[in-house]
Amino acid sequence: MHLWIGAVGRLKEPFYRMAQAEYGRRLKRYTSLTLVEVPDEPVPPGQKEREQVKIKEGERLQKRIPPHSFKVALAPQGRLFSSEEFAAWLGSLLDAGKAEPAFLLGGTLGLPSFLLEGADLVLSLSPLTFPHQLARVILLEQLYRAFRILRGEPYHY
């Protein structure tokens, strides 16, 4: 299986970049990973302008999504899994072998509605709110944890 992660914006803080690199390194033991960053936009003050920014960022992301992938959009209103449930879901996707997952992470303003509506799954990492840079690291950690759970390796306790 190959994992694809598309994210709006780049990781600016060195501690997020270090965490991303560490989990990317750990995941290589189980799968290959492509991480694509598309440019983000400054956040404007008005709601109408914010929607336009989300659309522009979403269009950039959409152009990079691999064809025939299983699109997983990350959003607060998405489906919540426990780590074990997430691992089981990922395992079933692996077993089906139909499509590789493409995880979509928005920028500061989140993902536009057309990406949420076009997703095969809308996933929430938590009912808590995280900065989008931290959400990327949490996703990578949970993917790593899921592979460890699927292999019966000690990590998820």
Image: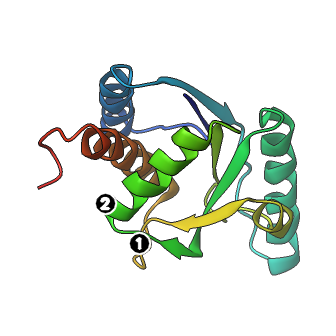
Mark 2, residues whose alpha carbon is within 10 Å: few (<14), some, or many (≥20)? some
Three-letter code for the amino acid on which mark 2 is drawn = Glu
User: Where residue 3 sits in the image (x, y, percent)?
Assistant: 56, 33
Dot 2 falls on a residue whose secondary structure is helix
Please state which of residues 31 and 34 is positioned toward the viewer in this rendering. Answer: 31
User: Where residue 94 sits in the image (x, y, percent)?
Assistant: 53, 39
Instruction: List the residue tagged with mark 1.
Output: 126
Check if mark 1's residue and mark 2's residue have beta carbons within 8 Å: no
> Where on the picture, by quarter, is residue 30?
top left
User: Where residue 70 sits in the image (x, y, percent)?
Assistant: 70, 47
CA–CA distance between discs 1 and 2?
A: 14 Å
- Asked if one can make out residue 67 in the rendered structure from this viewpoint, the answer is yes
Q: Quadrant of the C terminus?
A: bottom left
Horizontal arrangement in the rendering, residue 147 relative to residue 118 (left or right):
left
Q: Residue at x 56, y 65 (%)?
A: 123
Horizontal arrangement in the rendering, residue 8 relative to residue 59 (left or right):
left
As drawn, the label of residue 17 is: none
Q: Residue at x 31, y 60 (%)?
A: 84
Q: Quadrant of the N terminus?
A: top right
Instruction: List the residue tagged with mark 2.
Output: 84
Q: Is residue 120 above or below residue 61?
A: below
Q: Residue at x 80, y 79 (%)?
A: 47
Count the marks: how many? 2
- Asked if one can make out residue 8 in the rendered structure from this viewpoint, the answer is no
> Where on the picture, by quarter, is residue 119?
bottom right
